[in-house]
Amino acid sequence: NKNFENGLHTLLLLDIDVENKKFLSVKEALETLSKLEETEKGGIISEDAYLVVASKLGSDSPRIVFAKLKKLFEMEFELPCVIIVPAELHFTEREYLNFFKVD
């Protein structure tokens, strides 16, 4: 909430789950975010909120998606990934992200 209140984007690195020796999937991370929204600390990320998912950056097949949370649940992503929860976007940021927008 502090990042959002201060107009800062939040970067979520989907790291390795040490116990299971695997990367946390995008769906698992989104489910966790959704559960947090149901608590008293929630209120930032609704199912209509736009998020950015970037996968396999630095590889030969990178992918960036800008979509609503509810749409991201329907999609599959190759790992590793990061999720960006944007605060208010500057018009140039929004203009650029619209190249990656999925409705």
Image (cartoon, helix red, strand yellow):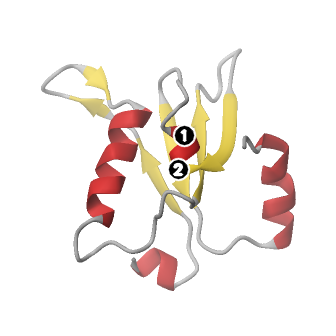
**Residue 61, image quadrant:** top right
In the rendered structure, the answer to whether residue 96 lies left or right of residue 5 reads right
Q: Amino acid at mark 2?
A: Leu
Q: Residue at x 80, y 62 (%)?
A: 94
Residue 101 against residue 16 in the figure, above or below? below
In the rendered structure, the answer to whether residue 49 lies left or right of residue 38 reads right
Q: Where does the image place residue 77, in percent across and percent down from the top left?
A: 53, 25
In what quadrant of the picture does the N terminus appear? bottom left
Residue bearing the label numbered 1: 72
In the rendered structure, the answer to whether residue 21 lies left or right of residue 67 reads left
Q: What is the crowding at mark 2: few (fewer than 14 residues within 10 Å), some, or many (at least 20)?
A: many
Residue at the farthest bottom position: 5
Distance in Å between CA atoms under marks 2 and 1: 5 Å
Q: Where does the image place residue 51, in percent across and percent down from the top left?
A: 58, 53
Q: Amino acid at mark 1?
A: Leu
Residue 65 against residue 35 in the figure, above or below? above
Q: Are marks 2 and 1 in contact (CB under 8 Å)?
A: yes
Residue 36 against residue 68 in the figure, above or below? below
Q: Residue at x 49, y 55 (%)?
A: 11
In the rendered structure, the answer to whether residue 63 lies left or right of residue 53 reads right
Residue bearing the label numbered 2: 69
Residue at the farthest top position: 60
Name the element at disc 1: helix
